[in-house]
Amino acid sequence: MQVYLVGGAVRDQLLGYPYHEKDYVVVGATPEQLLAQGYQPVGKDFPVFLHPTSKDEYALARTERKSGVGYHGFDFYTDSSVSLEDDLIRRDLTVNAMAMDEAGHIYDPYGGQHDLQLKVLRHVSDAFTEDPLRVLRVARFAARYASYGFTIAAETLQLMRDIAQSGELAALTPERVWKETARALMEDQADIYFQTLKDCDALKALFPEIDALFGVPQRPEYHPEVDSGVHTLMALKQACQANYELDVRFAVLLHDLGKALTPADELPRHIMHEERGLAPVTRLCERLKVPTQLKNLALVVCKEHLKCHQVQSLKPGTLWRLLQRLDVLRRPEKVIAFAQACECDAKGRLGLEQRPYPQAQYLLNAMEIVRNIRAQDLPAHIQGAEIGEMLIQYRIDALTEFKQQHGE
């Protein structure tokens, strides 16, 4: 029995990229041998075991054969006769098809180290096209390693395009699409993920609401980049550079979906695009079974982002009602996330990436003002329903004073 470290851990160790998960492949063993050594079985489709102490995953070397649609449509064969090379050739990219033995020796039958030096993401074999999930995985790797200078090999991008055009992407479950996308959104250059999906014609199949933004013009005096899809990815890039959380990045991605629905005779203006965007945001979130918290922030950013841009000119009562809709008293973190997303929208414009956005701090200051006014601050004789009414009045009065102090 021989044990090898495989996949991402080998790739990232050679790259000097931080990694945490370790996967191992076991050659020349049977399930019974691993069970006898205390390994715990966890695999349903093929034999995968957890190490008795480290809990790392150990999989028996296996081969696979396409037997259906989607990424579940495979028959797997495991036997002690399956070689390391047999196991590695079924993997997606050459940089993921390397193994390391316990002595640190690298086994690289398909040129992974060479492609690391070339900074190229290249498929191992034509069997790449048998698994549609690989389109998303390669796009995610492109986003992760873009800062290292990695690009996708032209022939691999063509295979990704072939998969997209075959209709096989429809076989992916919503949960799997969302899992890959959520991971991609947290990469340093998440915009590359969506650009890659567009480049291989997969964006239209997986995210038609986002794909529809490309080619839709905006007023150049406000958006020098003009294209709505380009602006969306520029705004997402801002969220990544600021290292914002997943909910903010996702909300930024969806904030302008309504622009794809603007009537042609109104272009390049986008009157009421905030309201028009609510339906496609909802549809995308429900289709991919996006967590409720992320969906809720995406909806409020879609609907209210122009209010944030105008916040310094809002009347105190209007500002209070905006804060109410943001759930300021119960969820101040939602107001913070909202302000972050709106700042990314404002800075995600060609040549305006460094422009200050004082609206964010203005909104957060207003949040602190209203949150610091509590029922105990009211006169003692105020009771019952009057408490709520008086609290609102106190908060609006405080916002009025705040606005006057800022000369607005």
Image (spheres, grey):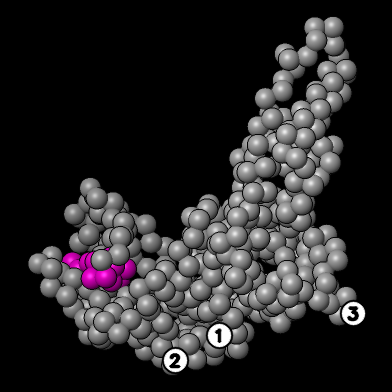
Give the alpha-carbon distance from disc 3 to disc 2, as whole Å.
39 Å
Give residue 32's position: percent from left, percent from top. 24, 61
Specify the label residue 268 is tagged with.
Answer: none
* Residue hosting label 2: 154
Give the alpha-carbon distance from disc 3 to disc 1, as whole Å.
31 Å
* Residue hosting label 3: 265
Give residue 407's position: percent from left, percent from top. 75, 40
- Select label 3 or label 1 by which is in front: 3
Q: Is residue 249 placed above or below 311 in the rendered structure? A: below
Front residue of 404 and 290: 404
Q: Residue furthest top?
A: 381
- Select label 3 or label 2 by which is in front: 3
Badge 1 amino acid:
Cys
Q: Is residue 307 placed above or below 158 in the rendered structure? A: above
Q: Secondary structure at mark 2?
A: helix
Query: Which circle's residue, 1 or 2, is located before the other in the chain?
Result: 2
Magenta stretch: includes residue 40: no
Give the alpha-carbon distance from disc 1 to disc 2, as whole Å.
10 Å
Q: Classify 10 Å Cα crowding around label 2: few (below 14), some (14-19), many (20 and above).
A: few
Give residue 30's position: percent from left, percent from top. 23, 67
Front residue of 346 and 75: 346
Residue 388's image quarter?
A: top right
Residue 396's image quarter?
A: top right
* Residue hosting label 1: 200
Badge 3 amino acid:
Asp
Tag count: 3
The residue located at (72%, 38%) in the rendering is: 406
The residue located at (73%, 69%) in the rendering is: 222
Q: Classify 10 Å Cα crowding around label 3: few (below 14), some (14-19), many (20 and above).
A: few
In the figure, is residue 223 to the left or right of 59?
right
Magenta stretch: includes residue 6: yes
**Residue numbers of the magenta segment:** 1-15
